[in-house]
Image: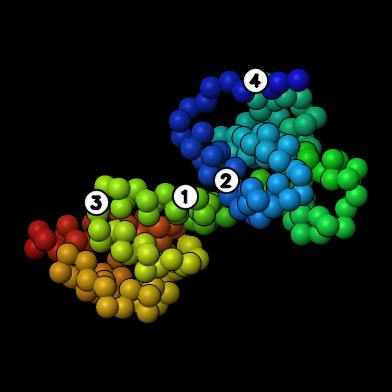
Amino acid sequence: MVVEIKPVEQDIEHLVTRVFLKAIDIIGGLQKLAEYRTLTWLPSLARAAFVIVLREDYLKTEDEIAEYLGISKNTVRQILRADPQLALYKIQHMDELSPEERKQLKVHTAGGIAKIAYRLVKEGEEPKIFEYYCAVTTEALEVPWAYLLLRKIKGTHFPVKSPEELLEKVKGLTIKGVPAEEIIKNIEYPIRNPAELLHKVKLYLKAKEEK
């Protein structure tokens, strides 16, 4: 049976996409899903991401979510009641599960993983693919300083709560004639993700130019 999801507002879809991609990161990426022959989980993860976002950000009831997504109220309830830590444990011990047990994991595990992914995204930890495309986009748009900065901080865990977490990595880099260390010391923290870092650096440079 094909479940038809009604069109949603852009801001909802953007957040759901980030949660969905972060959920794939948590599971170990598409390669890991392919190894376990669990690519059929992707629709379940997407559905769970929608459910969690609609409940947490838009305060939708179980009935409203079920109607919105065209799924049963029971499925919505299972996703919302899923235990994140239990889901993570099962993912980490996938090798020990029988094929039948893996089939039964979909709804509960997807719900638990989506909850973890939602929390991480809200805390500023973006999906790996999001960070990758930040770098690719800045290079394509010929913003050399942004590209160089992203390369310098590669591997940084977000959110970044203090300049000390970045100072050593940007040492020696100059951005539009300004030492990167000076910029890093003077922008506001915490910084939730690479995109926000680039934005704050840009604002600092603009303010410095206007002085």
Circle nearer the N terminus (2, 4): 4
Is 176 on the left or on the right of 59, as rendered? left
Q: Earlier in the sequence, mark 2 or mark 1?
A: 2
Residue 202 or residue 153, whichever sits in front = 153
Residues at discs 2 and 3 in contact (Cβ within 8 Å): no
Q: Residue at x 41, y 61 (%)?
A: 191
Which secondary structure lies at badge 3? loop
3D distance between C-alphas at marks 1 and 3: 18 Å
Q: Which residue is mark 3?
A: 142
Q: Earlier in the sequence, mark 2 or mark 3?
A: 2
- The quadrant the N terminus occupies is top right
Which residue in the protein does label 2 denote?
21
Whole-angstrom CA distance, mark 4 to mark 3, is: 40 Å
Numbered label attached to residue 4: 4
Q: For the residues carrying marks 4 and 3, which lies nearer the camera in this image?
A: 3
The 10 Å Cα crowd at callout 3, few under 14, some 14 to 19, many 20 or more, is few
Compare residues 94 and 58 and report the one nearer the observer.
Answer: 94
- Secondary structure, mark 2, is helix
In the rendering, at what x and y percent does residue 128 appear? 52, 54
How far apart are the two marked residues, 2 and 1, measured between alpha carbons?
Answer: 8 Å
- The amino acid type found where label 1 is placed reads Phe
Find out whether the residues at labels 2 and 1 contact each other: C-beta distance under 8 Å.
yes
Q: Position of residue 190 (x, y in %)?
A: 42, 64
Task: Indicate the position of residue 82 as horizontal and vertical percent values.
Answer: 77, 45
Q: Which mark is residue 130?
A: 1
The quadrant the C terminus occupies is bottom left
